[in-house]
Amino acid sequence: VSETLPRIAIVGLGHRGLAVLERIAALAGRLHTPTDVLIVEPHELGVGVHWRDQPEYLWLNTVAGQATAFADADMVDGAPVLGGPTFVAWCREQGVILDGGMGGPRPVDVDDFVPRRVWGDYLAMAARHVLARLPRCVTVQIHMGEARQVQSAGGGRGAVVLLENGTEHRVDLAFVTTGHGIRSDRPVVAKDDDGLDCYPLPQTLDAIAPGQSVAVTGMGLTAFDVMAALTVGRGGQFVRVGDRFGYRASGEEPSIVLTSRTGHLPCARPGRPRTVPKPYGRIFTDQALAEARGGRSDGRLDFREDVLPLLRSEILERPLFAEQRRLAEVVLTTEPRWFDNAENYADAVVADAQLDVVEAVEGLEVSAFKEAMESLRDLRDRLRDVVLPPGLTEQGHRDFFKIIPGLANRAAVGPQLDRVRELLSLIDHGLVCLGPGPAPTVKRRDCDDHWTIASTRLREPCEVVVDHVVGAHLEWPRAIGGRDPLAMAMREWAAPHPADTRYLRLDIDGRAHQLDGQTADGVIVLGPPSEGSNYYNNYVMWPGARSSLLVGVDRVLRPLLGCAI
Ligand SMILES: Cc1cc2nc3c(=O)[nH]c(=O)nc-3n(C[C@H](O)[C@H](O)[C@H](O)COP(=O)(O)OP(=O)(O)OC[C@H]3O[C@@H](n4cnc5c(N)ncnc54)[C@H](O)[C@@H]3O)c2cc1C
């Protein structure tokens, strides 16, 4: 490592890696600290998983007003920033026009859902913007390729980054921001246990011919992407009359069987999205968590005894109408429920979705149900605190990650309201049907290439046979639409999490622990690969909202760049 210049590597320059580059530039620029940065990225800088060639009908699930690539002072506790346009400001500058439905085409507003491709364009612009505004003291070397290994240099001497061309780079700090892995150009392979891997859409679904049948395993955001690709992506059209949606088929669609473990659809994103975050609870508070920790000899929480009851009370102890309370209980249910028969199950799922749509139209501040559900989003930093040291018992940690991400996704990270209305119209139309009850088994048949989907939670058992299966549940950790060579290589030296060996063991700042018990001081893992060690790392940054990710990055950078702590 250089005696004079701090050297920092950023491995993977998607949204997260770009945020790290901005923090280096802003902090080094403030004190004119000469700094060398090595960026390693095989694809277009900034874009990451938000591919620019994806079809227009795949939307970002964050409203435009809650997304930015640039830190502002509020996001980093008043620290210096480089500055740049928020997503909405840039969309307006660029004249991005949305198909505004019956109101006609119009410019992007803060509460609009915008095609993910446009977000990818914005991220590409943001990378160019940051690189063009680097302070003179910061020099950047870009390696357009892959890192094969990142590990500690030993003895507190930083990290070594090994590239695919065989060169090794010694750095003081290496940020591993490899997100969802590397996009692959290889054709998708059908897997015996899980059917087709769905990303990148839509070409992964080419094997599904018009009129064939396909089971989609999962009812979350990925399933909604798959359904969009198999309907509007194949020339179908949704026709809107008032608040009702109809569907005009193109004839190119397959018939779709939608299945899931829990057996309920995620709640639609509510109207009137927050313009500023609301990170306070009434019952699930810092104080309540501190008291719960105080009651444990080692301060480690038991998830089911200490955390879940507080969260349930936060959601349920508010003036909800009987139907709202019933629906809230359904969302909170973590185990698949039993139903009499397939019809009975499908009717219940549709009725719940219709009720949720009514609440979503009323929106936040008006619907008590939607306010209750939004707690899972509002309080994500508090949920993050639950996991941070001293954290949870080992069983508590497993329970947390078994329950919370799925619950948060169902309650507060769901599809856009229109997407749920579209699904209801597809069910009405007969193109989509709900699989045989919650948690069905999916098995490839020996006799032919078909698949059997069999109920496990119906009193009158039921089976459905389909031509294809598409995996639409993103079991983490798993690369999306490609491969993740670095995640595999790091397993040679990085310690697994003691509670769950699928995850890495990281400290509060993302510093990796080694198998030999030492801490790899120079290796910081952020974003999706750090999920499971800590919580909620897969989100885009919200302008004006304190970002624990960025504040954490500053904490790591400051000593190296000579800034006051
Ligand atoms: C399909 C999809 C849709 C999503 N939509 C939303 C959304 O609407 N709203 C939201 O808040 N979040 C969304 N997310 C969550 C997502 O995690 C974040 O939005 C965010 O983009 C993640 O950024 P990242 O930089 O950590 O990872 P990525 O965007 O995955 O970027 C990682 C980068 O690292 C590179 N890389 C990987 N391995 C290597 C290596 N070995 N060497 C060099 N480079 C490497 C990759 O090429 C890539 O450019 C979505 C995720 C997916 C998968």
Image (cartoon, rainbow, N blue to C red):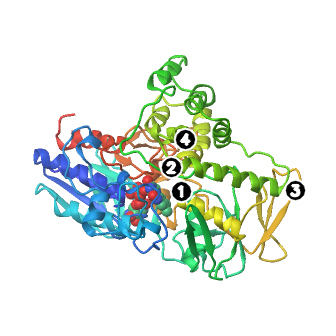
Tell me residue 366's x, y (percent).
Answer: 49, 41
Image x and y of residue 532, in percent: 52, 44
Q: CA distance from mark 1 to mark 2?
A: 7 Å
Distance between the Cα atoms at labels 3 and 2? 36 Å
Determine whether label 4 and label 2 are within 8 Å by CB: yes
Residue 391 position (above or below residue 342): above
Residue corresponding to mark 3 = 461
- Asked whether 528 or 466 is in front, the reply is 466
On the rendered structure, is 415 left or right of 23? right
Q: Is residue 433 above or below residue 288?
A: below
Residue 413 visible in the current orientation = no
- In-front residue for pair 135/91: 91
Residue 373 — which label? Answer: 4
Q: Residue at x 32, y 69 (%)?
A: 96
Which residue is tagged 1? Answer: 417
Q: What is the three-letter code of the residue carrying label 3?
A: Pro
Residue located 32% across and 54% down the image: 68
Residue type marked 2: Pro
Q: Quadrant of residue 67?
A: bottom left
| Residues marked 4 and 3 touching at CB (< 8 Å) | no
The residue where tag 2 is placed is 270
Q: Which image quarter has ligand 1?
A: bottom left
Label 4 to label 2: alpha-carbon separation = 10 Å
**Mark 4, secondary structure of its residue:** helix
- Asked whether, in this view, residue 249 is left or right of residue 565, the answer is right
